[in-house]
Amino acid sequence: MPRWLWFTPLALLVVAVAIWAFRLGWIAVTISESDVINTYAQRYLEEAGSTALLTDCTGLSGTGDGVWIIVRCTQAGRQFDYPVDRFGRLLDLPDGRTQPGVPQT
């Protein structure tokens, strides 16, 4: 068996990790604050009901470990907070429950 064939699995692993790292970097570079605010404002519209407006939502800078933006939507005394990380993932649900699949430290 040729010697180069022994290194093929390692080479494939290195290429796969490089593609994965490039993808994560691309997401981090191309996602904007407006994209995040618009995404979670749409979610707010679905959760808050028919009286909710897009103008109820604003973006605040994150306060805490890993929180990039907090999308805060207020309506008639109710407040919906959506803390979002740098990749656009929701870190906590508005009622304080943790989102399934997000590791907690």
Image (cartoon, helix red, strand yellow):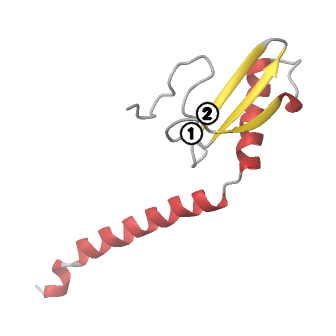
The amino acid pointed to by label 2 is Pro
Q: Is residue 3 above or below residue 54?
A: below
Circle 2 SS class:
strand
Q: Is residue 32 above or below residue 10?
A: above
Q: Residue 49's spot in the image, x, y percent?
A: 81, 17
Left or right, 97 with respect to 13, comes to right
Does residue 46 sit above or below 20 in this rendering? above
Query: Based on the displayed image, in which of its 4 quarters is residue 74 positioned?
Result: top right
Residue at 51% over, 28% down: 99
Q: Is residue 32 above or below residue 21?
A: above
Query: Which residue is found at the position 19% from the left and 86% from the top?
Result: 4
* Category of crowding for the residue at label 1, using alpha-carbon neighbours closer than 10 angstroms: few (below 14), some (14–19), many (at least 20): some
Image quarter hosting the N terminus? bottom left
Left or right: residue 70 compared with residue 77: left
Q: Is residue 41 left or right of residue 93?
A: right
Which residue is labeled 1 in the image? 67
Q: Residue at x 44, y 33 (%)?
A: 101
How many marks the image carries: the answer is 2
Quarter residue 72 falls in: top right
- Which label's residue is closer to the chain start, 2 or 1? 1
Residue 15 horizontal/vertical position (percent): 37, 72
Q: Which residue is mark 2?
A: 83
Please name the amino acid that badge 1 sits on: Val
**Image coordinates for residue 54, horizontal then vertical, percent:** 86, 32
